[in-house]
Image (spheres, rainbow, N blue to C red):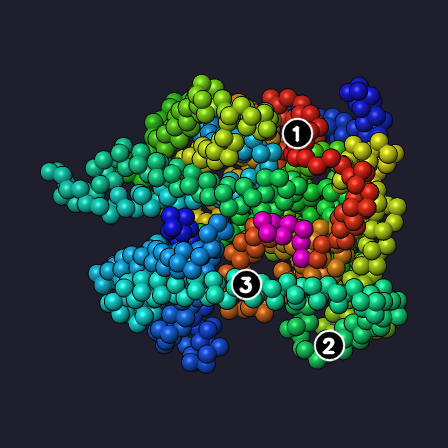
Amino acid sequence: MRTSIKNGIRLGAIVGVVILFFHLTGFSVVASSMLGSLLANVDKGAAMEEIPALNLAVILALMGMIAGGSASKNKQNDKWSNSLVSGAVAGAFAGLLTGIFIFVIGFANFKEIDLRNYLPEIGPDVIDSLLFGGNAAAPYLYLALLTVSGITGAALSKGVIRADWRKKAQADSVQSFKTLTQKPGVQKLFGNKIAMYGFLALAALLLYFLPTQWGSYWNYIMGTVGIYILLGLGLNIIVGLSGQLVLGYVAFFAIGAYTFGLFTAPEPHAIGMNFWLAILFAILAAAATGVLLGLPILSLRGDYLAIVTLGFGEIIRILIKSDMLTDFTNGPSGLSDLTQPKWLGQTFNDVNFFHLIVIFVAIAIFIAGRLQYSRTGRAWLAISADQTVAKATGINTYKYKLLALALGAAFAGLGGALFASRNQFTGPEDHILMVSINVLCLVIVGGMGSIPGVVVGSFVLKGVPELLRDLESYRLLAFGALLVVMMVMRPEGLWPIGRPAMEAAYNQKHPKDSPPEGEVQS
Amino acid sequence: MDEQKTKREQSSLNVGKLVRWIAGILLLALIGWRIYQTAFIEGGYGPDTWMRFIIAGLVIGGMYSLIAIGYTLVYGILFMINFAHGEVMMLGAFGGYFMFELFAFIKAPTASDPNMNFLNAYPLLSVLISFIVGAVVSAVAGLLLERIAYRPLRKAPRLVPLISAIGASIFLQNAAQLLFGPQRRQYINPDILWRGTGWSIPVGDTTVLLTYTGTLSLVLSALLMIGLAYVVNKTKLGRSMRAVAENKQAAALMGIDVDDVIGKTFVISGVLAGSAGVMWGIHNGLFNHYVGFLPGIKAFTAAVMGGIGNIPGAMMGGMLLGLLESVGPAALGLDFQLKDVIAFTILVLVLIFRPSGLLGEALSEEKV
């Protein structure tokens, strides 16, 4: 019983703080209005006070159920009474916290103290809707609602989610999925070349026809995703394969974009180079920068390398922006009117440009895939697993690390040039640290060292946020939280590389070869 | 064994080393030439200006030192870069700000002035409480950060906690922006501690202003650093911290609660960062949710410069970085926009030529 109460208070506190956070950041109101369009009881773009109290209540009840459900999990003594007590305590505690908060802001509103100076989201109308339309009994309502939903959540969790019949059904479904994938026919489909080519052809067909249909907005979004796939593939070679943590990847992106820009923009140099030649120069310039940067620093240890490259990225951006180089780079105003690609005398429109990006991505995936499973790729993997051992087996680690950096930089240079050309503009603010972090995150979220992972990661981190436009201001917040949760729950990524599984299978067959189990000193 | 390894490394790193040294000599020559030019040929700045730069450098250097110690403590124990440490400092700045606002709001009428507020009636107490609140906010933030984002990852590969830290940093920055708004806020100092007031020190034929806020920051950071040195060297907690940094398993076998010590380390670094945040607010005035980012990275630079994992190194590195950053652009005759470039260039140079830092010992491969 005591653990149940303790559990309840712990989860109640967590969920209570989360609800407060949602209230304070205005997320509760946004979510209520989104729920409104789902329940069709709010018009799009309705004012805050028009949102019915029901929607907020539904969201609160969901939170309460989450609190109750998670609190009711008790490993030692999974009894009905314990579960319900935990759920009730969790709900009541969350209700108490939020009730007090609601009382305070309601009181402040009543006394006409404007909290917006400190908490900009808490305006009078928001407070009204958080108080279920200015209801004076709102604190009690919160308490009651959250307690009831906590108990409901606990009951649902105990009676449905953790019920014995469901556990069995779940195990069965996992088993049947496993047997399905192991059926000879399905296995054949996976390994079959014809099936694969068919799938590729279908994908190519879709990628050819879809852009003509879905309009320029989606072309832009999907083009961005494509460019990020390019960047991700490059960084994947550096970080995922060769294991060198580079945080200033944006430097190569910037070098690519600016090389392209300086060669093609009418200002400040008016060279007016051809698109294709400029792209080539951008790739070469980025790769050369990679080599030049890599020569002195690649012998550094992991974390130091990360920070040096981070510093390098910032140096490049600040230098581009500085007054010192304004004559050369156009300073903070950036380069505009960059060349668009031309083919047979015709300038590319957005559909052509999207196709161009797709072609480049396909080439990049081909190159990256071939490299990954070549001797070079194995050398990189060996370096990332253990540099000393790699060296001892005769791998010239320095050379391979340099190669990885140069190749990764070349990919970034291509991405930068394409990005600049598509926007017909590039400026210092395109090359902030956030680009590096975005790319690194998509590589990691997808699964380090995994090419399909890069593609999945780009869609998740660059494509999905576009679908949730209403939540634009919460995007980075969710992004940060996602990274932490991802690292804690699933550090291998969404689509992990197959190699560790293969190793595990090998170790099972040859138990003597596997390294001794034990804690590795970090 | 060691000798063999160095030999092998030498042969494979020959090209890199050569490039490194040529670049280093060229760079030193360039810097020497620039300093010679600005100091002796152009002679643009008088002694009073240099004095001003040095004071500004020391004040900012003190803050860098406090933040850098946080990086170094955590790195020394967990071998991870606490990327979110700058955000911990930012939260401290917010904590102090809200305290000041509260004190300015509370009325404390005195006989001479019925409109007096608490802040001006008891300035010393207000400043002290604000510092304590800022430090507590940061300490709690650091503790939660460790519990939520780092503790579950203690045994993961090294990249994993770093990514988690980057995520936490993004989260905290945006949470602060959403909660408190993106606008810049200004610290309301007590009247006697108003920014821009201070003692005038005669230098040559002009005077240089030594501000009260700057003096307060510098003295307080010195006191905090002395306190930290005492805690680390003389107390039981400090001894366990050093033991855990040396070897977690052995420390656990000696009866030290490793998790507890790590938590306390985060609390200590949070206290230092929070104080630095309040100092930042009092001295510079303006701040927003983004305030932790650059000082965080620069403090990391300072920690690396002094040799990461080395506490005196972090203190020295912070001071040195503050000074170089404020004197550097003038000495090299550069634009003041390039102040940040100087900091990062120093970082790159230190790492290339002396990766273990100025005071750091050479770390063995295992600690890498």
Residue A26 x, y percent position in the rendering: 41, 63
- Asked if residue B325 can be seen in this view, the reply is no
Kindly check if marks 3 and 1 are in contact, taking CB atoms under 8 A apart as contact. Answer: no
Residue at 70% x, 53% y: name it: A447
Q: Tell me whether marks 3 and 2 sit on the same chain.
A: yes
Q: Which mark is residue A164?
A: 3
Name the kind of residue labelled 3 in the image: Asp
Q: Which mark is residue A210?
A: 2
Task: Identify the element where label 1 is drawn.
Answer: helix
Up the image or down, B246 lies above or below A88; here it is above
Q: What segment is highlighted magenta in the picture?
A: A487-494
**Callout 1: 10 Å neighbours few (<14), some, many (20+)?**
few
Residue A333 x, y percent position in the rendering: 61, 56
Task: Identify the element where label 3 is drawn.
Answer: helix
Task: Identify the element where label 2 is drawn.
Answer: helix
Q: Main secondary structure of the magenta part?
A: loop
Residue A123 or A55: which is nearer the viewer?
A55
Gap in Å between the C-alphas at discs 3 and 2?
A: 47 Å
The C terminus of chain A sits in image quarter: top right
- Residue pointed to by mark 1: B367
Please give left or right for residue A34 compared with residue A250 in the image. Answer: left
The answer to which image quadrant residue A334 occupies is bottom right
Gap in Å between the C-alphas at discs 1 and 2?
A: 52 Å
